[in-house]
Image (cartoon, rainbow, N blue to C red):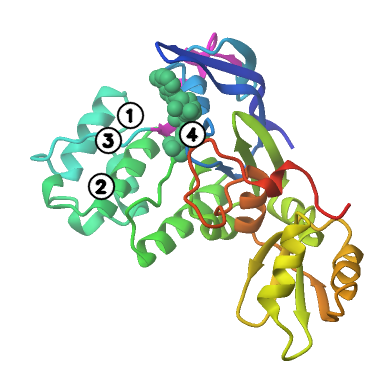
């Protein structure tokens, strides 16, 4: 496979009166041709900084980037025509129709005007194309934004949170659209917080936390590499479940208590669980690895799982990510 996008060792430091912040701290990413690639990370982890740096909107302190094999930002003018991007919600003139908006953009970008009805059809706005943008819902504006990025038939489409504001039907249509675009040979880089959606849409993902890559690969690989670290524990009926959970928690385990069982995250050595409980005459009835979904992996790797008894603060990393328990 060929890489459409390569980033290595990217560093970006913001300086303000409050001090220095390393938004990107040696970040790496590779997106192969024809993939729908998910770019995931918690708030403030560096996603927008990465995308803006890639598009030449801000200057990195260090690192190498290439789009379609061309080093950027040096060769951005050569590849810009093959990259469609929506990084910040584009503003449209409210009094213009979608059709006029796209026609003006096509004209300004030297794009064949026949692309306008084609992209309106693609994003499902054909029947509302002659209505003013101010009458559009948020979801329809999102579609118009995607349509504008598709005008020049890009080889690489970069979308920051394209499903934002869409209802479930809209999200499903956006998913179909992404798959159709990918089937037509386009590579799509997609940042999103809707992890279930990413799991359904994407072939591969990169997860970023605190400006560094913490996981990358096909969705199946990323999931497989984390399947066995969380275990589900059931006890014999009638045993005090919260009490048992507390014993493990006191020993440093990250516990999530459910109705009739609890889970232990990051449990490198599940035997430790049975041992600790048996010492208190509590016997485990079931101990099974939980197959992780992308949300579990994300929470674990980025340290953004909810904090017990408190509100997690920005930049606060949960104990579970600071190393395995029971190793
Ligand atoms: N212009 C700026 N000046 C100072 N700090 C900044 C600036 N832009 C971003 N940052 C900081 O850099 C870090 C990364 O921000 P960035 O916007 O790239 O994160 P993000 O992953 O896109 O977050 P979100 O999901 O919330 O949009 C954050 O700590 C943010 O506060």
For the residues carrying marks 3 and 2, which lies nearer the camera in this image? 2
Q: CA distance from mark 3 to mark 2?
A: 20 Å
Can I make out residue 140 in this image? yes
For the residues carrying marks 2 and 1, which lies nearer the camera in this image? 2
Q: Is residue 207 above or below residue 29?
A: below
Q: Circle 1 sits on which residue?
A: 111
Q: Which residue does the image show at 70% across and 62% down from the upper left?
A: 292
Q: Residues within 10 Å of mark 1 (few under 14, many from 20)?
A: some
Please say whether residue 83 is one of the residues in the magenta stretch.
yes
Q: Which residue does the image show at 50% across and 48% down from the upper left?
A: 181
> Which of the labelled discs sits on residue 113, or is there none?
3
Element at label 1: loop
Q: Residues within 10 Å of mark 3 (few under 14, many from 20)?
A: some
Q: Is residue 212 above or below residue 235?
A: above
What is the magenta range? Answer: 71-87
Q: CA distance from mark 4 to mark 3?
A: 39 Å
For the residues carrying marks 4 and 3, which lies nearer the camera in this image? 4
Q: Which residue does the image show at 76% across and 80% down from the upper left?
A: 234
> Which of the labelled discs sits on residue 141, or is there none?
2
Q: Circle 4 sits on which residue?
A: 44
Q: Which residue does the image show at 37% across and 36% down from the upper left?
A: 149
Q: Mark 4: is the Cβ under 8 angstroms from ligand 1? A: yes
Q: Nearer the viewer, residue 73 or 124?
A: 73
Task: Describe residue 149's horizontal placement relative to residue 96 as left or right.
Answer: right
């Amino acid at each position: 496979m060929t890489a459409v996008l390569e980033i290595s060792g990217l560093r970006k430091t913001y300086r303000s009166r409050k001090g220095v912040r390393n938004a990107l701290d040696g970040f790496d990413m590779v997106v192969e041709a024809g993939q729908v690639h998910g770019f995931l990370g918690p708030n403030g982890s560096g996603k927008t900084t990465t995308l803006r740096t890639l598009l030449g909107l801000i200057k990195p302190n260090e690192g190498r980037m290439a789009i379609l094999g061309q080093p950027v930002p040096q060769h951005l003018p050569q590849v810009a025509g093959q990259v469609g991007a929506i990084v910040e919600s584009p503003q449209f003139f409210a009094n213009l129709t979608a059709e006029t908006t796209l026609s003006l953009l096509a004209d300004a970008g030297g794009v064949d005007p026949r692309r306008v009805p084609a992209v309106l059809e693609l994003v499902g706005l054909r029947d509302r194309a002659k209505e003013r943008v101010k009458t559009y819902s948020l979801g329809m504006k999102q579609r118009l934004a995607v349509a504008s990025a598709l005008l020049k038939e890009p080889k690489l489409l970069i979308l920051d949170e394209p499903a934002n504001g869409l209802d479930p039907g809209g999200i499903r249509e956006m998913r179909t659209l992404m798959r159709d675009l990918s089937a037509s040979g386009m590579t799509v880089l997609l940042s999103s917080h809707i992890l279930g959606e990413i799991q359904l849409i994407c072939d591969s993902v990169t997860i970023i936390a605190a400006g560094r890559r913490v996981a990358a690969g096909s969705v199946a690989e990323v999931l497989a590499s984390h399947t066995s670290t969380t275990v589900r524990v059931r006890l014999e009926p009638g045993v005090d479940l919260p009490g048992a959970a507390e014993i493990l928690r006191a020993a440093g385990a990250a516990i999530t208590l459910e109705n009739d069982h609890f889970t232990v995250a990051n449990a490198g050595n599940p035997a430790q669980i049975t041992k600790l409980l048996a010492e208190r005459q509590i016997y485990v009835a079931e101990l099974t690895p939980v197959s992780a979904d992308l949300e579990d992996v994300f929470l674990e790797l980025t340290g953004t799982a909810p904090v017990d008894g408190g509100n997690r603060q920005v930049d606060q990393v949960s104990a579970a990510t600071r190393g395995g328990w029971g190793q």
